[in-house]
Image (cartoon, rainbow, N blue to C red):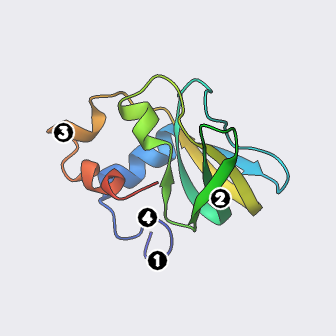
Amino acid sequence: MQKGWLAAESPAFRDWIVRTGRWRVVTAGTTLYHAGDRADALFGLAAGALDVATPTESGEVVTFHRAEPGNWIGEAAILGASVRTLTVTPRRTAACSGCRLPPSYASSPKNPGTGRLFAGSA
């Protein structure tokens, strides 16, 4: 893998994505996941765009981030919480690799640098 999504990452991490990821295409007008859903995977966005929103106390849903290819979505829930706190919907058709990640994966000495991938994601 010389260019494109994940090109700058380690061969071990790229291999893990290929081994564990399940590709999913999500079209505009649908939802990748809702706040309150069980957290069961994180998603690497390879194509398209995803809007990330949060519900307010009044019930309004406020979009605060637009994820573009190369972003990770859902890592906070899978690494710490049992339910989603955000709602993610495609702005336009999006292709995501959904990966089930054990909670200890990001800090594992066998996976150095992996935590950095998730530190700045939505």
Q: Which mark is residue 114?
A: none
First along the sequence among labels 1 and 2: 1
| Extreme residue in the front direction | 58
Spatial distance from mark 4 to mark 2, Cα to Cα? 21 Å
Q: Is disc 2 in contact with disc 3, using a CB cutoff of under 8 Å?
A: no
**What's the CA distance linking mark 3 and mark 1?**
25 Å
| Side of 112 where 58 appears, left or right | right
Q: Amino acid at mark 4?
A: Leu
Q: Which residue is mark 4?
A: 6
The residue lying toward the viewer, choosing from 98 and 89, is 89
Looking at the rendered image, the quarter that the N terminus falls into is bottom left
Where residue 9 appears, as percent x and y from the top left, is: 33, 63
The Cα atoms of the two marked residues, 1 and 2, are separated by 25 Å
Q: Residue at (35%, 51%) from the top-left corner?
A: 118
* Labels 4 and 3: the sequence-earlier one: 4
Residue wearing tag 1 = 3
Q: Quadrant of residue 78?
A: top left
Dot 1: element: loop
At 46% from the left and 22% from the top, the residue drawn is 82
Instruction: Tell me how far mark 4 sits from mark 3, CA to CA.
Output: 19 Å
Mark found first going from the N terminus, 3 or 1? 1
Where is mark 3, residue-wise? 110
Image location (x, y in percent) of residue 96: 62, 52
- Which one is nearer the viewer's eye here, 5 or 40? 40
The residue type indicated by label 1 comes to Lys
Task: Residue 79: name its quadrant.
Answer: top left
How many C-alpha atoms fall within 10 Å of the one at disc 4: few (<14), some, or many (≥20)? Answer: some
How far across and how far down the image is residue 43, in percent?
A: 54, 46
Residue 51 is marked as 2
Q: Which residue is outermost to the bottom?
A: 3
Give the mark toward the camera: 4 or 2: 2
Q: Around disc 2, counting alpha carbons within 10 Å, would you say few (fewer than 14), some (14 to 19), or many (20 or more)?
A: many
